[in-house]
Image: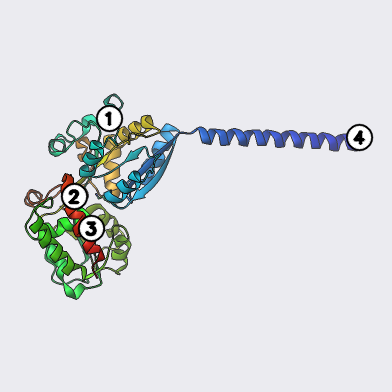
């Protein structure tokens, strides 16, 4: 009886403990569920992971990250009905197209005190100068990356893609505006040309180059270059400097004919579920110390003026990040060209289909 009482008491205690545990784990689940989620849709390798974790801790939220490989792929996915994203980082030309279609939310500057740090020189050239619906995130320069020990006679020119001795070991972007833009620049035209004969010239050149390409690609080229599978690639500046950490033979050049300078902007979709948190994240990214830390990690330039003094010389003196004035003068940002976009789509479709 005594024993039974003992056992019963133990069993009762165990039962109580178990139900306490169950209650606690239920509470934990509820708590985890209650944590707001910021859903970010951006390019790959485009934010320092530690900064995401810091924001999550500071805000008691979760950040879920999904990546896209081109503006057009991101836009097509949203147009096909993808919802639930709170923050996107399209390039400025795509921002203006999306804004014109009513897809973006107007920003509340009262929630964005760090906008005071945005570089006014950059804003003067920006499309959305008042940051009505977009805040600049990173400046990216397009160029050519190659393995110095493996490629002879490199000239800083888009003509490198015509090198038949590198056939099968080169890639160009799977990005309509970037790749057609490179051919237009090579021929001395604007990369926003809407002239049918200039575009026809670019198409002929690209059909020639395509014979030398292993593929059109925006993401795998990084690993391919690091491993030596590819010897020369169409590349975004920051990606190349990230890859250089793995392979010190990697070099980056900006073609003398001029190149694409992009600004990718932070925008909140009109149907975002967490617009407050999205504003908080934009402001967090523009804290000068955070902006500098992010640039040091991903090697793209955050146009936050107060952060420049915090950047190490390795970044400030890198001509692939801060372009030389003469190259900058020949370079352009991709513009929203309206209905003339159809000309590019036609060239691109033919190029992709060509053998
Ligand atoms: C980063 C891609 C850079 C974005 N992986 C080009 N605008």
Give neighbour class at mark 1: few <14, some 14-19, many 20+ (Cα, 10 Å). some
The location of residue 215, given as percent across then percent down, is 27, 66
Q: Are marks 3 and 2 in contact (CB under 8 Å)?
A: no
- Gap between marks 3 and 1 measured at Cα: 32 Å
Residue at 14% over, 54% down: 259
Of pointers 1 and 2, the one earlier in the residue sequence: 1
Front of the two marks 3 and 1: 1
Q: Residue furthest bottom?
A: 165
Q: Secondary structure at mark 4?
A: helix
In the picture provided, is 102 more to the left or to the right than 11?
left
Ligand 1 within 8 Å of disc 1? The answer is: no
Residue position for label 1: 106
Whole-number angstrom distance, CA of label 3 to CA of label 4:
80 Å
Q: Quadrant of the N terminus?
A: top right
Residue 11 position, x and y percent, is: 80, 37
Judge whether residue 248 can be spotted in this image: yes
Q: Which mark is residue 341?
A: 2
Tell me the quarter of the image containing the C terminus.
bottom left
Mark 3 vs mark 2, CA separation in Å: 23 Å
- Mark 4 to mark 2: distance in Å? 88 Å
Which residue ends up furthest to the top in the rendered image?
A: 110
The first of marks 3 and 2 along the sequence is 3
Residue at mark 4: 2
145 or 97, nearer to the observer = 97
Mark 3 closeness class: few <14, some 14–19, many ≥20 residues within 10 Å: many
């Amino acid at each position: 009886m005594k024993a039974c009482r003992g056992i019963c008491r133990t069993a009762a205690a165990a039962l109580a403990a178990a139900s306490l545990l169950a209650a606690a784990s239920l509470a934990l689940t509820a708590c985890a569920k209650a944590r707001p989620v910021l859903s970010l849709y951006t390019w790959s390798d485009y934010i320092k992971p530690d900064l995401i974790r810091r924001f999550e801790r500071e805000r008691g939220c979760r950040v879920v990250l999904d990546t896209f490989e081109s503006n057009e792929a991101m836009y097509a996915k949203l147009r096909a009905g993808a919802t639930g994203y709170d923050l996107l980082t399209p390039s400025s030309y795509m921002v203006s197209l999306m804004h014109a279609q009513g897809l973006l939310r107007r920003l509340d500057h009262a929630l964005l005190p760090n906008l005071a740090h945005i570089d006014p020189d950059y804003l003067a050239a920006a499309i959305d100068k008042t940051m009505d619906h977009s805040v600049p995130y990173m400046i990216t320069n397009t160029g050519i990356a190659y393995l110095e020990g493996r490629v002879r006679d490199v000239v800083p020119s888009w003509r490198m893609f015509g090198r038949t001795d590198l056939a099968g070991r080169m890639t160009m972007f799977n990005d309509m505006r970037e790749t057609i833009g490179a051919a237009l620049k090579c021929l001395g035209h604007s990369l926003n040309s809407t002239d049918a004969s200039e575009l026809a010239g670019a198409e002929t050149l690209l059909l020639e180059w395509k014979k030398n390409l292993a593929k059109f690609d925006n993401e795998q080229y990084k690993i391919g270059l690091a491993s030596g599978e590819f010897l020369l690639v169409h590349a975004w500046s920051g990606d190349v400097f990230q890859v250089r950490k793995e392979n010190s033979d990697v070099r980056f050049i900006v073609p003398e004919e001029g190149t694409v300078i992009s600004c990718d902007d932070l925008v909140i979709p009109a149907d975002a579920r967490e617009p407050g948190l999205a504003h908080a994240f934009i402001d967090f990214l523009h804290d000068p110390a955070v902006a500098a830390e992010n640039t040091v990690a991903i090697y793209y330039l955050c146009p936050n003026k107060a952060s420049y003094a915090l950047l190490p010389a390795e970044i400030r003196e890198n001509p692939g990040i801060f372009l030389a004035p003469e190259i900058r003068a020949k370079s352009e940002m991709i513009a929203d060209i309206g209905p003339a976009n159809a000309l590019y789509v036609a060239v691109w479709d033919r190029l992709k289909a060509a053998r």
